[in-house]
Image (cartoon, coloured by chain):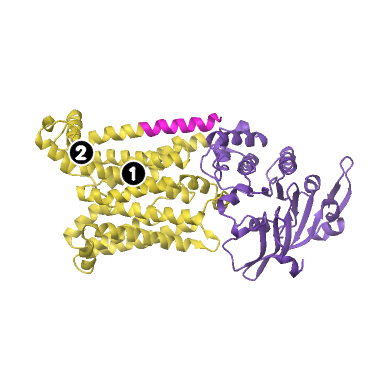
Chain colours: A purple, B yellow
């Protein structure tokens, strides 16, 4: 991207980071990363531990909003600079699923999911309907009356996903919606890993939501993502369609382990074998 | 419709109504309890006639005097202090996502107490100017300032550029409490005998100093607490998920934090000024409510206010009657009732969870 481009208004329809860098002290956490989330697509972010995946997602989520001095670059959401978005409107279009949740108070599962409706004023009836549907989507309706702290790690993760889905359930007229998922499958069993990412896909395709998912399983990324971004030590070393980006030449040095690719026997995607 | 959520809100409304009725009954009972026993019926009639609702001569004149000038202000003060301490405790626990965050624990009570004691001990010498300037409110102002100062100090120690750490705040609170209790020790060391007596009763907590003046001084403070804290109920609910999660849900986390810390310092400081250090209410009452109604602050805060008022009112009745004509400091009563009760609840809970 050259200087002339910077004056042109960004595409009104996406969530883009342009040349964002983040330094803490002398440590460079992100180094001129440029990446955009496109509505209707799932973007998987891959990279070894400490590559800056979570940091990048937190930056999009506004976690470093008070870090003005150390952050540079532009983050634009639906055509408006991130900083110009009022907090409550932002909360209606960007849902963030954290890696862990510290909730230790005995809310019921239904109450946790209903918290996702906080940024909206759609009324109790509608909120309850959405809560119910969101919980059913993640296969958690049977848990509705259980105390959240008593759930297993995987159940908690699904309930949190339902909360985030409830948060961006409807189009509120503020433009495309975004779903940021930080390792959404880390605590899930095999079936629920696929169910969760299939759900992300469904939302991208049917609701025109843009999904950013940090993943460790390259096969899940290859199966469910449209685009893949590879991060290494804070730099984006490649981004683009799955088939173009995921090559043995890139993945082997990135993860420091021998990676080979072959065609999946049934699906039109690469199958990644590591080690 | 979700049965789970509706059931809880129905239960909460029922509990709030029951608590309000129990509080009303205790109010009437409290007005009747004392060296001169007044029956339920006479208490009720006396109260109504004070409000101008029944005929003048419904009860003997001396009863009306006792009710109006001694027992009613004390009863009202117990209600105000109990409600305020409980609701401040509940809000701080939500803010710090820690059911053990008690106003006493994070330094609010200690700071307020130290400042108030310094006014008691030095009021006739070093701080004479301050006391004369704010006459009826000097103690309350000092307690508020002390509570706020320690809370801000603790919050500042615990806040880095990455946000406020709850663990750091609790640790800083413990450290601040060590310093304030050392300060209290120094003041009790230099105090005169009569000051020492005031001071001792005061550090154990007492509603004995209740007058209409203290009630009216505390009323606006408690009104503010009871209006402002419940207004943040939804933000507090989101904060229970974690600060980042609350931010992602559109909550202005820093503003909510500042607001709740300021109001809690005001509420606790005001109570400390009029009644000394009454512990335990802010810890146990919200806990009991949470166990029965769940952690939703929309119900937790009002229910805590009502239960806190009821709890302190009943404790005060014990304080007045157990060793009559002497009074047991109410802080000792709250600890004696609440402590074992709390331990019992914890044991029951760990058994039911741990199996």
Residue B279 appears anywhere in the view: no
Instruction: Give the quadrant of residue B319.
Output: top left
Q: Which mark is residue A45?
A: none
Q: Is the magenta stretch mostly helix, strand or loop?
A: helix
Q: In which quarter of the image is residue B87?
A: top left
Circle on res. B83: 1
Q: How far apart are marks 2 and 1 (CA)?
A: 22 Å
Tell me: B220 left or right of B346: left
Position of residue A255 measured from the top left corner of the image (x, y, whole percent): 79, 58
Q: Is residue B345 left or right of residue B73?
A: right
> Dot 2 lies on which element?
helix
How many numbered marks does the figure carry?
2
Q: Up-down: is B151 above or below A115?
A: below
Residue B53 placed where, x, y %?
19, 33
Which residue is identified by label 2?
Answer: B321
Instruction: Indicate yes or no whether the magenta region holds residue B8.
Output: yes
Point 63% across, 34% down: residue: A133
Residue B222 in sight here:
yes
Chain of residue at mark 1: B
Residue B196: give x, y in percent of width and height.
20, 58
Within 10 Å of disc 1 (Cα), the crowding (few <14, some 14-19, many 20+) is many
For image coordinates 47% across by 51% down, the residue present is B96
């Amino acid at each position: 991207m050259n200087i002339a481009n910077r004056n042109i208004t960004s595409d009104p329809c996406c969530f883009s980071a342009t040349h964002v860098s983040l330094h803490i002290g002398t440590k460079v956490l992100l180094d001129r990363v440029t990446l955009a989330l496109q509505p209707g697509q799932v973007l998987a972010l891959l990279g070894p531990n400490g590559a800056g995946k979570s940091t990048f997602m937190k930056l999009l989520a506004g976690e470093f909003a008070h870090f003005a001095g150390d952050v540079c670059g532009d983050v634009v959401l639906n055509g408006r600079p991130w900083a110009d978005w009022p907090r409550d409107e932002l909360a209606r279009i960007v849902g963030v699923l954290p890696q862990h949740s510290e909730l230790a108070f005995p809310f019921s599962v239904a109450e946790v999911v209903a918290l996702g409706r906080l940024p909206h004023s759609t009324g109790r009836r509608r909120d309850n309907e959405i809560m119910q549907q969101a919980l059913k989507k993640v296969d958690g309706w049977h848990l509705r009356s259980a105390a959240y702290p008593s759930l297993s790690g995987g159940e908690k993760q699904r309930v949190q996903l339902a909360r985030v889905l409830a948060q961006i359930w409807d189009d509120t007229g503020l433009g495309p919606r975004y779903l940021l998922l930080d390792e959404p499958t880390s605590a899930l069993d095999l079936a629920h890993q696929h169910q969760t990412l299939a759900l992300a896909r469904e939302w991208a395709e049917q609701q025109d939501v843009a999904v950013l998912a940090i993943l460790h399983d390259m096969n899940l990324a290859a199966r469910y993502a449209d685009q893949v971004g590879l991060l290494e030590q804070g730099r984006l070393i490649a981004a683009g369609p799955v088939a173009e980006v995921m090559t043995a030449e890139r993945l082997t040095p990135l993860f420091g382990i021998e990676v080979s690719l072959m065609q999946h026997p049934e699906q039109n995607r690469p199958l990644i074998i590591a080690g | 419709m979700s049965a789970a959520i509706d059931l809880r809100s129905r239960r909460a409304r029922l509990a709030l109504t029951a608590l309000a009725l129990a509080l009303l009954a205790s109010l009437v009972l409290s007005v009747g309890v004392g060296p001169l026993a007044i029956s339920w019926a006479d208490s009720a009639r006396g109260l109504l006639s004070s409000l101008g609702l029944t005929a003048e001569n419904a009860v003997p004149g001396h009863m009306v005097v006792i009710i109006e000038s001694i027992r009613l202000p004390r009863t009202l003060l117990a209600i105000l202090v109990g409600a305020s301490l409980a609701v401040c405790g509940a809000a701080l626990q939500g803010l710090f996502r820690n059911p053990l965050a008690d106003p006493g624990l994070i330094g609010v009570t200690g700071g307020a107490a130290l400042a108030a004691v310094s006014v008691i001990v030095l009021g006739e010498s070093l701080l004479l100017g301050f006391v004369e300037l704010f006459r009826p409110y000097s103690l309350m102002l000092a307690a508020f300032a002390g509570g706020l100062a320690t809370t801000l100090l603790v919050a500042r120690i615990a806040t880095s550029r990455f946000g406020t750490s709850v663990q750091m705040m609790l640790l800083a609170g413990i450290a601040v409490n060590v310093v304030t209790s050392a300060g209290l020790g120094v003041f009790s060391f230099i105090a005169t005998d009569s000051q020492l007596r005031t001071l001792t009763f005061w550090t154990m907590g007492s509603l004995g100093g209740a007058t209409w003046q203290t009630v009216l001084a505390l009323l606006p403070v408690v009104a503010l607490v009871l209006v402002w804290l419940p207004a943040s109920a939804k933000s507090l609910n989101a904060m229970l998920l974690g600060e980042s999660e609350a931010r992602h849900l559109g909550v202005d986390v820093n503003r909510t934090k500042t607001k709740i810390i300021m109001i809690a310092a005001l509420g606790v400081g005001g109570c400390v000024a009029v009644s000394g250090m009454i512990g335990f209410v802010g810890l146990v009452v919200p806990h009991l409510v949470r166990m029965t109604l769940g952690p939703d602050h929309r119900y937790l805060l009002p229910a805590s206010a009502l239960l806190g008022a009821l709890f302190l009112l009943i404790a005060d009745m014990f304080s007045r009657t157990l060793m009559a004509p002497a009074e047991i400091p109410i802080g000792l009563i709250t600890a004696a009732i609440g402590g074992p009760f709390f331990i019992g609840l914890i044991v029951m809970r760990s058994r039911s969870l741990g199996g």
